[in-house]
Image (spheres, rainbow, N blue to C red):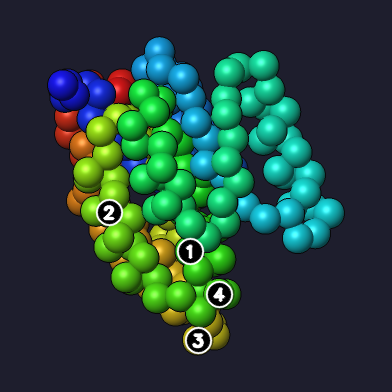
Amino acid sequence: MTTESQRRSALVIGAARSGKSRFAERLALGTGLVPLYIATAEARDDEMAARVAAHRADRAGRGWTTIEEPLDVIGALSRSASTGQVVLVDCLTLWLSNLIEAGRDPDAEAAALATAVAGATGPVVLVTNEVGAGIVPINALARRFADAQGRLNQKIASAVTDVILVAAGQPLRLKPAPEVTL
């Protein structure tokens, strides 16, 4: 039988370099379960390769299993549903970029991910960027991306038990729950 604490889920949202990934990792590790990290980034240039390497180094020696999945996050999440692990997906913003680049429908994918998260039997933590707090982008692709990111964030926020905004490394609970811990 799955208890309510095992089914907790969280969306951790914030700006670039806000501390959201580090907070999400602490949240996942705080469950006491074996952590599974679903990474959506692809190292397509030297700078991104350095970021990926830094994230891997941060997780080294802390028990993480990593699945690198730039597109099939829903499948990876579904395959891990009955493993007894806490699943961390980092990050939905890169996943969205990958979907758009691959010509996939971001709204359909967001709906499918929300369904998968809501149906997960174990805890899930998802990391995403808040990109809508700035000016309206000047070009159509950037506006399409910002709009899709906003809809994705809203859809996932409605499917999780907790939503936490991280700014300057400090968490602020947006969606009430008895505790922020999973």
Give the residue pinned by disc 2.
Answer: 114
What amino acid is at disc 1? Answer: Leu
Q: Earlier in the sequence, mark 2 or mark 4?
A: 4
* 152 with respect to 19 (left or right): left
Q: Name the residue furthest right.
A: 46
Mark number displayed over residue 28: none
Give the residue pinned by disc 4.
Answer: 102
Q: Is residue 57 above or below residue 72?
A: above
Contact between marks 1 and 4 (CB within 8 A): the answer is no
Q: Position of residue 134 (x, y in %)?
A: 46, 64
Q: Residue at x 36, y 24 (%)?
A: 84
Q: Position of residue 177 (x, y in %)?
A: 17, 29
Q: Earlier in the sequence, mark 2 or mark 3?
A: 2
Tell me if mark 3 has few (under 14), some (14-19) or many (20+) residues whose alpha carbon lies within 10 angstroms of its own: few
Kindly tell me whether residue 7 is visible in this rendering.
Answer: yes
Q: Position of residue 108 (x, y in %)?
A: 32, 70
* Quadrant in which residue 132 is drawn: bottom left
Q: Is residue 127 above or below residue 130?
A: above
Give the residue pinned by disc 1.
Answer: 96
Mark number displayed over residue 140: 3
Which quarter of the image is occupied by the N terminus?
top left
Question: Disc 3 and disc 4: Cα gap in Å?
Answer: 17 Å
Question: Disc 3 and disc 1: Cα gap in Å?
Answer: 16 Å
Kindly tell me whether residue 136 is visible in this rendering.
Answer: no
